[in-house]
Image (spheres, rainbow, N blue to C red):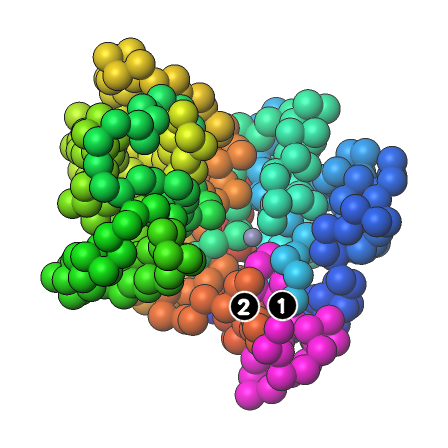
Amino acid sequence: MLEPSVFLNRAEEMKEELLEKLMHILSIPSIYDPNTADNNAPFGKGIREALDYMLNIGKEEGFRVKNVGGYAGHIEWGEGEELVGILGHVDVVPPGSGWSDDPFRPYLKDEKLFARGVQDDKGPVLAAFFAMKMLKEMGIDPGKRIRLILGTDEERSWKCMDHYFKHEEMPDYGFSPDAEFPVIHAEKGLIDLAFHIPVPENEGNGNVQLLQLSGGDRLNMVPASAQAVLQTPKQDSVKRLFETYVTDRKIDGNIELVNSMEMKVICYGKTAHGSTPEQGKNAIMFLLEFLTGLDLSHPLKEKLKKIIGYFRSTSGKGLQIHSRDDVSGSLTLNTGTLRWEQKHMNIGVNIRYPVTIPIENWYPQILSVAELEGWSVNTIDHMEPLYVPQDDLLVKILLNTYENHTGQKAKPISIGGATYARVLKKGVAYGAMFPDRPDTAHQADEHMIIDDLVRSTAIYADALLQIIRHKI
Ligand SMILES: [Zn+2]
């Protein structure tokens, strides 16, 4: 085994060239652009230009390169049966506002490189590319095929990968340098469901009528606000009840009188990512709870109570689908959207389930609740969990390499989110963000510390060499 310093010194020697090439690709605004999209550039000209740039520098180094319909491409080195994948992407999110300088004119400041995409994911892609180049220049014969796969639509729909793997071979195993160190080896299963719930009309008794009800915009966020329009001759008493309610619950709320009969009530919760709904305060649930305290028609009130019972628990207890495993923790449920359309309620839910618990174990329970209650349920999206056990040689090699280079003991990470590694049949996310660094991806002044880029290059080279030398 070679000392980490061997790789680090070589990476240092390559730094100037790495920076020059990185700054070149960073200056290409590779943002999805339907206006310039065509058959050769399905996601627009900027993205196509960034892909071409990578493939060109790959060719210059003597690697085999392939453009797969402008959707994706790869840079490949070595011969052999086994195919090792390194999966990154060259598209970036729009710059947004708040930048100190031009996000597509990369600049160095305080040993950091600033530009849109430097962390996500052009810097890590270049680090992986230079790792391949380093090993090639060391005269290594890989005896396997090492393939750097370049996606172009990671930030939107991953359609690049659907297309790529329709035409190209799936690697036997690999990693994605599109997240953080040390290693993400478990990612919960993800399913988005739409519940269609018949609701009785407002008719009958009750001093308060519900005219409108809605909340939340996205399934993967805890809704920050929810609103209802009510009709009542007793505006004063509703107003008092609302003020007491928001005070009791320690949330913010707002009430507006529309006219002498109608009023609009808004509950504000606290948003959080859909993977950690327990850290948020779901505005929809607060609003429903408030409504059940009003003098609504009895059947409607009962229906709202039921909805709260089923959907409020962020662990899925309400639907009796709660479960957990030691690798990835508890199932989470986020009720992200609610729309009421007179005769039915549409509720959008995002569920993330433990990696070792198959969907067949709990999904039928949802169907039986739906059947019992007369709802319909549609799956909007489903991503299987990703899980490579801790004692798998791939995970061991990547962890050991990281430990050797940083001098720090490391444990593999489990997350509720999704990294690009999910695209691989057997893959994990590996870098290039170091644990104590700020995550600036998708933000203004996105940056990467130059030293981290060099260290990542060394780590990737060393890890690839270990992968080459082992039978995985
Ligand atoms: Zn990314």
Q: Percent from the top left, x then y, of residue 302? A: 19, 29
**Contact, mark 1 vs mark 2 (Cβ under 8 Å):** yes
Number of marks in the image? 2
Task: Name the image quarter holding residue 239.
Answer: bottom left
| Magenta-drawn stretch, dominant element (helix, strand or loop) | loop
Q: Is residue 50 left or right of residue 202?
A: right
Q: Which residue is denoted by mark 1 in the rendering?
A: 96
Determine whether the beta carbon of the residue marked 2 sits less than 8 angstroms from the nearest atom of ligand 1.
no
The front one of 103 and 165 is: 103
The residue stretch that appears in magenta: 96-121
Find the residue positioned furthest to the bottom. Answer: 110
| Rendered residue at 52%/43% (across/down) | 420
Q: Residues within 10 Å of mark 1 (few under 14, many from 20)?
A: few
Q: Percent from the top left, x then y, of residue 378? A: 44, 21
Task: Name the image quarter holding residue 30.
Answer: bottom right
Q: Nearer the viewer, mark 1 or mark 2?
A: 1
Q: Is residue 228 left or right of residue 165?
A: left
Q: Is residue 111 magenta?
A: yes
Against 375, residue 302 (above or below) is: below
| Rendered residue at 46%/46% (across/down) | 218
Sequence-first disc among 1 and 2: 1
Q: Which residue type carries mark 2?
A: Gln
Q: CA distance from mark 1 to mark 2?
A: 8 Å
The front one of 31 and 78 is: 31
Against 230, residue 244 (above or below) is: below
Where disc 1 sits, the SS reads loop
| Rendered residue at 53%/52% (across/down) | 178
Q: Which residue is denoted by mark 2 in the rendering?
A: 443
| Rendered residue at 81%/34% (across/down) | 69
